[in-house]
Amino acid sequence: MERIKAARPRFAALADAMYGLKIKSGPFGINSRPAMIGAKYAATQGKPEAYNKAMLKAYWQEGRDISDLAVMRDVAQRVGLDADEFEAALDNTEFEAEVDVDIWQARRYGLDGVPAMIFASKYLVVGAQPYDELRLVVEQIAARGSG
């Protein structure tokens, strides 16, 4: 946790220098599990990408606590989800089980932090990487015929 916390200023500087993004992150060490469960619900409503982008923006650029129910409801509404249905879905055991599977799979891959991306089901890229680095990974995988 201390290593992650210590890396935040570097991450903010890179995001600004490379992408012009101003990082104003939410509180450190929060429980993001309810937001992950909410993502499962958003996917069933055809809004997974909009929800994920809005939740990430709320945390990383707006400095909001995405573990707070009022914040989660607001984000859900901003992407066109019914806030009451969204809140009810946070107690859905099927969505909870899907999140458990995602976490189990991440641990199986040896992931213990974010961001982490797996390409072609076997190439792991850890940490916030510049766009050019990610493009290079994709090009190398394509050249190998693995993707």
Image: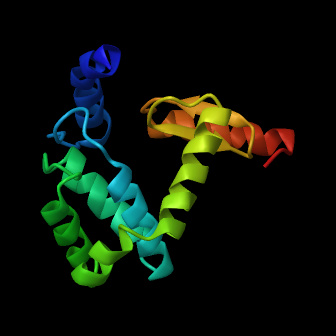
The picture quadrant where one finds residue 3 is top left
Residue lying at 37% horizontally and 68% vertically, measured from the top left: 91
Residue lying at 60% horizontally and 34% vertically, measured from the top left: 107
x then y, percent, for residue 43: 48, 73
Closer-to-camera residue (138/105): 105
Q: Is residue 132 above or below residue 90?
A: above
Q: Is residue 124 above or below residue 143?
A: above
Left or right of 64: which side holds 56? right
Closer-to-camera residue (82/16): 82
x then y, percent, for residue 93: 49, 67
Closer-to-camera residue (130/90): 90
The picture quadrant where one finds residue 85 is bottom left
Residue lying at 37% horizontally and 50% vertically, measured from the top left: 33
x then y, percent, for residue 76: 26, 73
Point out the residue furthest to the right here.
145
Q: Is residue 71 above or below residue 121?
A: below
x then y, percent, for residue 20: 23, 42
Residue lying at 48% horizontally and 60% vertically, measured from the top left: 96
Left or right of 75: which side holds 53? right
